[in-house]
Amino acid sequence: MPTLPLLRLLDPICSGCDDSCIMGQPLLLVLYSLCALLLSGGSLYLTLRESRSNPAVRWFVGASLSLLVWLVTLFLFLRSSDPGFILRVGCANFASVSLAVYFGWRFVKAVAGKPGSPLDRPLLYISILLALLSAFSPWIDRAELVGVGISARHETIYGPLFPLYAAHVVGLLAAAIYEAFKGSHRLVCYLHRRDQLLLLGVGDSGNERCGPYLQCRAALRFR
């Protein structure tokens, strides 16, 4: 049975150890604490400092809180060996990721200055629906199997709607990455054109010898 990737990110680090051994490593505890502090502190800082009407702030806070829940579920998942508790934690893990990818996608769009689209609201409803199904039904995370012994591993049995869930998560992540790269390209183009216009202004304000030369060079680059 496949191991849930989102919940086994630490396998390369923790190879050869059981889950109680994993959480005994001071470095991992420091990393958990640091990530939790950054997520909660960043959300609190932006909420207090920036205007709440700014959509980028709202989406950032939503994504940070969802990732904070994901981090807590990952921490609890690695500390327990009770199948019933592990299943509840795994369901919460799936639910938080469904919301985090949507909030992250909207945050990237807001930072890029892209206006809303007709897909925004339907995707929000789909994200909420998948989060509810993940948390309260076996249709996405059906069961968690807990092994015994020093090399024990937690195994996840996926529900029938897991392919839809996976497509939703991967699709929004891909869309966020696409928007981020497209937004950075627009910013570079804007800065490039601004520098060219600034060069034209310098040419206008220069002496009669340098002015025409600078204007000609800038005009050729601007094309």
Image (cartoon, helix red, strand yellow):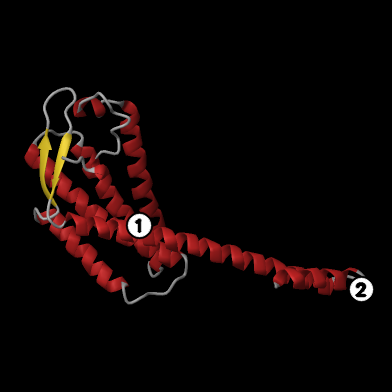
Query: In the rendered view, does 33 fall on the left or right side of 3?
Result: right
Please give the name of the residue rendered at 38% of the width and 62% of the height, measured from the top-left corner: 175
Q: Which residue is mark 1?
A: 173
**Quick one: 56 or 179, which is closer to the camera?**
179
Outermost residue, bottom direction?
A: 118
Hey, what amino acid is under mark 2?
Answer: Glu
Q: Which mark is residue 208?
A: 2
Hey, what amino acid is under mark 1?
Answer: Leu
Give the percent coordinates (x, y) of residue 40. Answer: 34, 49
Give the percent coordinates (x, y) of residue 93. Answer: 21, 48
Q: Which image quarter: residue 116?
A: bottom left
Q: State which quarter of the image contains the C terminus.
A: bottom right
Please give the name of the residue rendered at 29% of the width and 53% of the height, measured from the top-left corner: 65
Query: In the rendered view, does 69 fall on the left or right side of 158?
Result: right
Q: Which mark is residue 11?
A: none
Please give the name of the residue rendered at 7% of the width and 41% of the height, measured from the top-left corner: 84
Cα–Cα span, label 2 and label 1: 54 Å
Asked if residue 57 can be seen in this view, the reply is no
